Amino acid sequence: MNILSKLVLFVSFIILSSCNKTPDLDFSQIQYLDGGDLKSVEIGNGKKTVVHFFASWCGDCRREMPDANEVLSKAGENVRIYYLTDDSPERMAQMSKKYNIPFETYQVNKSLKNVGVYYIPLTYFIDENGKQIIAQAEQINWHSKEIKSFLGYN
């Protein structure tokens, strides 16, 4: 391998390893459609919040959906849950039906990339005060002690 090839590989590695898969998002700037109304993601204000970005074409999203639904459905009323996607309303309805999603799924008013989401699935767990506790890009273990502890059950 010549020196130029090694340099290109090294630079590529540095660039890829510096990409932040779990960016610090400004959730107040993320808007979604609820029926015909444009709303903002609500964080803090005395409730824990889970913000889960997904897409119908994403294999990891589809694989983790049953576990996410099971775990989050036990979270109770002290946890706000946002399932956000840039899929079309038709694709959202198909996925909700296929995976029996027990929560509302919302369409962001921009593409996921335009709100700063470059990797999916991407999930944020935010405490009652708005502090990010867990941020996980890629498929997640929804049955982990860390997540169940955050949600308040074992």
Image (cartoon, rainbow, N blue to C red):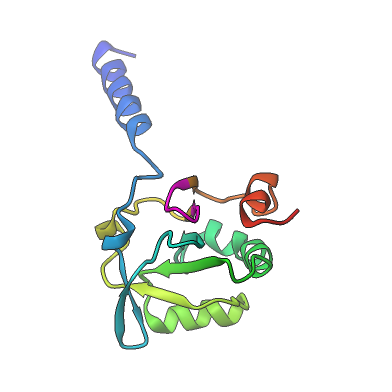
Q: Quadrant of the N terminus?
A: top left
Residue 64 placement, left or right of 37: right
Q: Which residues are magenta?
A: 125-132
Q: How many marks?
A: 0
Q: In the image, residue 102 lies at what x, y percent? A: 60, 77
Q: Quadrant of the rendered structure where residue 75 is?
A: bottom right
Q: In the image, residue 42 lies at what x, y percent? A: 39, 66
Name the foreground residue: 72 vs 129.
129
Task: Examine the rendered structure and indicate whether residue 145 appears above or below residue 100.
Answer: above
Q: Quadrant of the rendered structure where residue 10 is?
A: top left
Name the foreground residue: 42 vs 95.
42
The question of residue 121 being in magenta is answered with no
Name the foreground residue: 23 vs 126.
126
For this orientation, the residue located farthest to the front is 46
For this orientation, the residue located farthest to the top is 3
Task: Examine the rendered structure and indicate whether residue 137 appears above or below residue 84.
Answer: above
The question of residue 130 being in magenta is answered with yes
Task: Examine the rendered structure and indicate whether residue 81 appears above or below residue 101.
Answer: above
| Residue displayed at 55% across by 56% down | 60
Q: In the image, residue 145 lies at what x, y percent? A: 70, 46
| Residue displayed at 59% across by 50% down | 140
For this orientation, the residue located farthest to the bottom is 36
Q: In the image, residue 44 lies at what x, y percent? A: 43, 59
Main secondary structure along the magenta-highlighted residues: loop
| Residue displayed at 41% across by 61% down | 43
Name the foreground residue: 54 vs 133.
133
